[in-house]
Image (cartoon, helix red, strand yellow):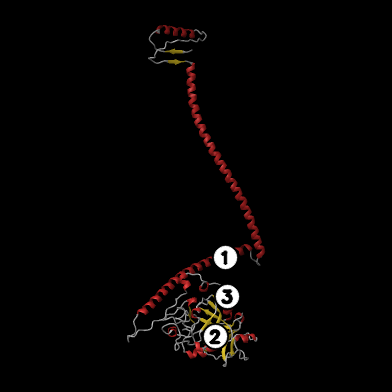
Amino acid sequence: MQLLSAMWAPGQRTLQLLLLLGASCARAGAPRCAYTFVLPQQKFTGAVCWSGQAAAGRAREAVNASEVAALRVRVSRHEELLRELQLLAAADSAVAGDVRALRKESRGLSARLGQLRAQLQHEAGPGPGAEPAAALALLGERVLNASAEAQRAAARFYQLDVKFRELAQLVSQQSSLIARLERLCPGGADGQQQVLPPPLVPVVPVSLVSGTNVTSRRLDPAPEPQGDQTLRQQGLMASPMPAGHPAVPTKPAGPWRDCAEAHSAGHRRSGVYELRPGRHVVLAWCEQQLEGGGWTVIQRRQDGSVNFFTTWQHYKVGFGEPDGEYWLGLETVHQLTSRGDYELLVLLEDWGGRGARAHYDGFSLEPESDHYRLRLGQYHGNAGDSLSWHNDKPFSTVDRDRDSYSGNCALYQRGGWWYHACAHSNLNGVWHHGGHYRSRYQDGVYWAEFRGGAYSLKKAAMLIRPLRL
């Protein structure tokens, strides 16, 4: 049954009667009727009410629509969660695949490690009563300890190297300042102007201060050449007899023209030999084991037992003992080198036991009329070239000043040498004990490119022999 109610002005009573008639039919159990009302098109001025089964259905539909909307919201949320779960499941699947691959690789590495361990044990072989695992553990511990010790030593060496460079720069600056002050100082009390002192060579090698990598000036502890190793093993620069003992010839046969001739005759033992390079017989030390032998030692410094600050005549004829510190003599060396092409080998050793060498493939001395002028060939070696600066220079002593300097270099350097202005090497200088020395001038036994001008070497030797072409 449908019931409509509305409020309007005309026909109100007729509408009420019709409504009462419809209500009575419903109570009498009459069949349901449908009524169609034709209402005039008028403007409503009040509320219009409508009730019945259709209204209840629409109310239920409205309730269901709100619930459906809520369910749709929940379903959409669940779908979002489902998508997130699907993404997580895909990521977990990839991770699981990676984990399986890592486990497989780990098993392969473990198998390989077991094979290597078994191979190592098989090659090393367990000692009697010792377990391979314990031996390997002990070996690993020793390797770790050695590595740690090497790292500490490297760090200590780096610190010492930095400190040494700083001190070297400081000493070089002080040397330059001292030289400048001495040039500015006036003469003595008598008012006469003194002769300017000679220029100083670097107190440490230039390569160590500037950091250059020139091979001839390098001081890095590189492996020693075979000749230096042989020299150290045999102790060739050390005297076979205490200083002061008379030199006794090693071989009675002779005299020989030089040590190379004695070596060719089958005399392979190093020692004192009689040589006759000219009219007179002299005693010299022959080195018959170093680099094929045949070397004639013309100069040796090793303990400071001989004073090399002497006159021209002494340097001409020679002095000292051939089994200790000695100088063979300028005239003898001239007579030897005037017969053919000779080579020169200079052996050096500092107070730390490090050796160095300088080799020249040409060496000779002019006669006394040319003041025994030095002639040198090409340099090779690891000591640095500190002698070529003296090439073509005459020999000078305290009583025969032939250098290129305004003063007397032999007086400042306290020795005899082929001074220029003044020296890059001074192997006939003062033998200072301990290496580094303090003196007004650079007068030590130094080789500037090896340890600098302010370091007096412990040992030095000059050897010559015929050049083997």
Residue 143: which disc? 1
Kindly identify which residue carries mark 3.
225
Report the amino acid beneath label 2.
Ile
Residue at the image point whose x is 64% and y is 57% from the top = 114
Comes first in the chain, label 3 or label 2: 3
Looking at this view, name the residue that lies furthest to the front: 369
Report the amino acid beneath label 3.
Pro
Residue 298: which disc? 2
Residue at the image point whose x is 59% and y is 65% from the top = 139
Q: CA gap, disc 3 to disc 2?
A: 22 Å
Q: CA gap, disc 1 to disc 3?
A: 30 Å
Q: Quadrant of residue 362?
A: bottom right
Comes first in the chain, label 1 or label 3: 1
185 to 118, vertically: above or below = below
Which label lies toward us, 1 or 2?
Answer: 2
Mark 1 is surrounded, within 10 Å at the Cα level, by few (under 14), some (14 to 19) or many (20 or more) other residues, namely few
Q: CA gap, disc 1 to disc 2?
A: 49 Å
Q: Nearer the viewer, residue 37 or 456?
A: 456
Residue 84: which disc? none
Report the amino acid beneath label 1.
Val
Q: Secondary structure at mark 3?
A: loop
The reply to whether dot 1 and dot 2 touch (C-beta < 8 Å) is no
Q: Nearer the viewer, residue 89 or 249?
A: 249
